[in-house]
């Protein structure tokens, strides 16, 4: 069953960013020093997350580090370079697939950097969830804005 989020979006605004997400999904906020992790999920098993990195690391370095963590953890990680944008800027993007507990998992990673921060979007779902939530994850990602440069 696909989610219809077109009429139930809620806007998050804080920490210099904004994005729209389904209002019936849960949102959690965690601080780690100056960095912030915002996680949005429907049921806890699949999620969309935005990490705000105040030290502005290079997007390629952030994504490579994330990919390495998955490769170190799982034996069968397949990595695909993809084209994409985040916060209306060209992003460094990868899509990963791996098996865990006999389930095929897909992860999307996208990262950009501005003068104020780097943003990393990370979404994850199993293959049986992905057809329902991929469009929602894409919609959330497309709505991300850095407030200092949003027009």
Image: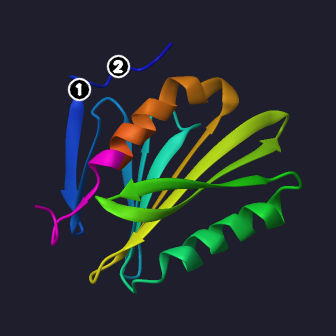
Residue 33, horizontal then vertical, whole percent:
41, 82
Q: Where is residue 85 in the image (x, y as percent from the top left)?
A: 39, 56
Seen in the picture, residue 71 relative to 105 is either above or below; the reply is below
Residue position for label 2: 4
User: Circle 2 sits in a helix, a strand or a loop, which is it?
Assistant: loop
Q: Which residues lie in the magenta part?
A: 142-151
Observer-nearest of 85 and 65: 85
Query: Camera-side residue: 113 or 75?
Result: 113
Q: Quadrant of the C terminus?
A: bottom left
Residue occupying the point 21% across, 69% down? 16
Q: Residue at x 51, y 23 (%)?
A: 132
Q: For residue 146: magenta?
A: yes
In the displayed orientation, state which residue is furthest to the left. 151
CB within 8 Å, label 2 to label 1: yes
Residue ID for mark 1:
8
**Which one is in front, 128 or 150?**
150
Give the image quarter of residue 81.
Answer: bottom right
Pointer 1 local density, CA inside 10 Å: few below 14, some 14–19, many at least 20 = few
């Amino acid at each position: 069953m696909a989610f219809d989020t077109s009429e139930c979006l809620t806007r998050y605004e804080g920490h210099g960013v904004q994005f729209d997400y389904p209002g019936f999904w849960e949102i959690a906020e965690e601080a780690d020093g100056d960095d912030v992790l915002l996680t949005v999920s429907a049921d806890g098993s699949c999620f969309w997350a935005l990490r705000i990195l105040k030290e502005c690391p290079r997007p390629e370095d952030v994504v490579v580090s994330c990919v390495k963590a998955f490769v170190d953890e799982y034996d069968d990680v397949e990595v695909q370079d993809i084209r994409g944008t985040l916060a209306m800027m060209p992003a460094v993007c990868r899509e990963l697939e791996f098996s865990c507990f006999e389930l095929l998992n897909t992860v999307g990673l996208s990262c950009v950097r501005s003068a104020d921060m780097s943003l990393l979007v990370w979404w994850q779902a199993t293959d049986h969830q992905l057809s329902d939530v991929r469009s929602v994850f894409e919609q959330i990602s497309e709505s991300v804005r850095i407030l200092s440069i949003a027009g």
